[in-house]
Amino acid sequence: MFKALAQVALRRLLDAVPTVFLLSIVVFVVLRALPADPLALLLPPNATQADAAAMKVAMGLDHAVPVQFVFWLRDAFNGDLGTSISFREPVTTLIANALPATLELSIAGLALALLISVPGGLWFFAVRGQRKEVVADLAIVSMLSIPTFLWGLLLMLTFGVAFGLLPFAGRVDSDAILPSGTGLLLVDYLIRLDWRNWLSALSHLALPATALALGFSPMVIRVLRSSLIEASSEAYVMAARQRGLSETRVLIAHMLRNAALPAITLIGAQLGFLFGGTLLIESIFSFPGIGNLMVQAVRNHDLPLIQGIVLVFCITTLLINTLVDILYVVLNPKLRKSS
Amino acid sequence: MEKYLRFTKREFCATALGLPLSTLFEGEALAQVSDTLSIAFPVDVQSWDPTSVTFPAGQSIYKCVFDSPMHYSTDQKLQPKQIKDRKWLDEANTRLEITLQDGILFHDGSQLTMEDVRYSWIERPQKDRRLAIGGMIPDMNDIQIVSPTKGVIIFSKPAPSVEYYLGFLAAYIIPKAYHLRVGNEGFLEKPIGAGPYKLVDYQRGSRIVLEAFDRYWAGVPSIKKVTFQILPEPTARVAAIESGRVDIATQLPFREAVRLSSNSNLTSDIYDLSEVFLLQVPSYVEIYKNKDVRAALHLSIDKQALSKSFFNGVAKPLSVLATSGSSSDVPGYNFPYDKARAIASLKKAGYDSAKPLQITLQATNGTYPNDYLIARALVAMWKQVGINATLSEITIAKYLELNHSQKLDGVMLYSWANPTGDPENFAGRILNPDLRFAAWRDAALAPRIAELYAMKLTPQRIEAYKKLQIEASENSWSIPLLQTVGNVVSKKGIAVPKYAAGYILPAEFARRR
């Protein structure tokens, strides 16, 4: 089994190389094709044309776009994604500082989404044909029609303002000292057994993660329910029932395992959207991740930073998809054989 | 009753759900009342090198950490700060002697001296042309160091008005020895200044935590800890102050600031800022070279109606590029709102209802108070006289790029900040064709503005600038609209000094107990 998993991982990672390369070309060319002039933001108010020309040379913008790309690629291989125009700091430093926050938020959002969608899918399946199904259907459609950022605002106004139960800005209380370590606050505070700040980090994650989860779950609930309905008429389910197994056991031990495969495929495909959803959510909740950084970069027309973040988004999404493929192989024996 | 009800709900929910979180928040609230302050703030700093950017919105934070050589009081008067004394050594105003306060220390305990001033204002900008300080005070050639606290700034041209800029943008002093030791990246990672607060924690786009500097030359601030909670989303700032999670929120949507004024737990202050809403007219676009077209654009704007509709009539309509009551203002001059004249001007330019004038209006959305709504109202006002304007959303960065390369294709709704109140930083810069801010780039104005720049700070200088301001309005080179209105909402008991520049300076706060 491990051999099969390693093969899948290796194949996926090899496939990812040309994808990343092609994407970096597309991003590089598109950003340079825009009628944007990064020099305008870098130069002081009294800059002359000569200053502009000197700056252009210093930044390598006097070369043709393909040559600029080769230089950029060479530097990127050495871990240098350039310097941010608006923040005047290395892009790699900015991204490295912001990425853990986004990863933590995405993981928390995914965990919550699974906590909502798996029981939700099972319940939705269980109430099929009953009056409750109409209510459940209505709830799912309503959830589907509310975009993630609106969930964010609704949750903030309800639990942050009206009831004052949960914080809605930043990652931790202002008096908390940020620990060094992984950058994942829940992990870092846990290692230090700092429960007060761990709780603070958890409470700060609650609303943005729930907003992401609520935007993500309804689709999974629907797919899981459909898969369960399909599985319910399969021969192995009939056989299990004839063996006298309880309906709950049939559902959990037999049907769910098989019905989970399409849901996992969907989750894999949607994870990129969940990761992308952090863009607005981080901005609303003042969460210092790369989504927030991206919004600032776009607002400031900071081309090197936009390019760097897009690259990181792309690589992260490809890695997530690889992990999902591995999980798929773990759950599906047929794929293990074919591998 | 409202407070009681909210507290009961929270207490009830916390107890019912068994959440330990409420205990944490309660502790936080108690701490805030004693000596900490949290501020819901709309922007983060662009860079921790304050000399590298001209960024009016971030000056509150820079002033906390770096202090400033000069300072504008709440009534917009220039006052000594790190520089305690200044005098011109020559008639031509090319040699300015400055004396620093005694005993100014940086946060690492080292003394701030003229070496640091020279490094920040001369040595670094001469090496790095990107630093904004070089652009803000362009003719500064050298600083002769007389003693650790005294020096003479040498200008290549007469610079009588330079003192105005020592309390405005980019003119900050950073520690030479520390900057050289840690390098620029190290400095940006861990900046130190000589301001009333030290930076103790920074999460980009999220929060800035400051701690009172116990060796600040002007005395230790009474508020020991300040957190700037960066909340670019206006709704989040409203939610933060309404829920009591922050002590102060700034630049809320105008209607929200008005609504919150009826909240018995909060104080909502709405006040004039030293900023003007204006329309930048690009002279490099053919259609705007026609004076009658520009006149029609200007005459058809009912500025009073804009103020009433979007600022409850609080924002002052402007006839010149100057804030009301500032030294640049021209009391008694009024540019009319006259639809009939606007239609006549359009006709003279060859346009009427059968052949309407087609233009583009560029506006930001959410960058300035009610910016996009004002732009929509302008489109409607122009429609009434036969101008069909297409409204297009733009960012400031994009505007600067397009204007820099003379590719802006329409008029731009812009806001110009000028805490100095001096006309040089209104018409003198807005219309200076050599600067990238200028959209109206008339080469003929360059020598005139250069001459004004070199004039001594006399009433004649102000009069000469006022003539230029009036001429700019009469010719609609740039169209002044309204004085910008700002707001700050705070918990009852916190006295927030209101600066026309919109600064929030916790070191200046006095708490009423």
Image (cartoon, grey):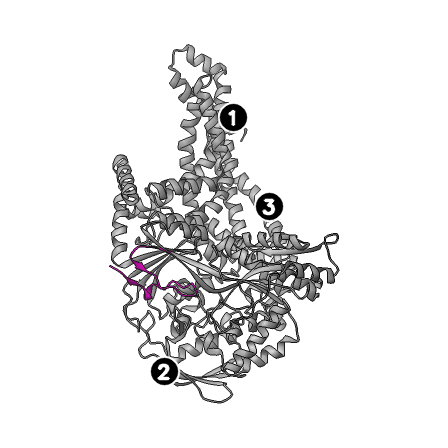
How crowded pointer 3 is (Cα within 10 Å; few <14, some 14-19, many 20+) is rated as few
Closer to us: mark 2 or mark 3? Answer: 2
Asked if marks 3 and 1 touch (Cβ < 8 Å), the reply is no
Quadrant (top left, top right, bottom left, bottom right) of the N terminus of chain B: top left
- Check residue A334 in the rendering and tell me which mark sits there, or answer none: 1
Tag 3, which secondary structure?
helix
What stretch of residues is rendered in magenta?
B489-513
Query: Same chain for marks 2 and 1?
Result: no
User: Disc 3 and disc 1: Cα gap in Å?
Assistant: 28 Å
Image side of residue A294 versus residue B224, left or right? right
Tell which of B228 and A112 is nearer to you. Answer: B228
Q: Residues within 10 Å of mark 2 (few under 14, many from 20)?
A: some
Judging by the rendered image, the residue that carries numbered circle 2 is B148
Label 3 belongs to which residue? A18
Chain ID of residue with mark 1: A
Q: What is the three-letter code of the residue carrying label 3?
A: Pro
Give percent across and percent down for residue B484.
Answer: 49, 61
Q: Chain of mark 3?
A: A
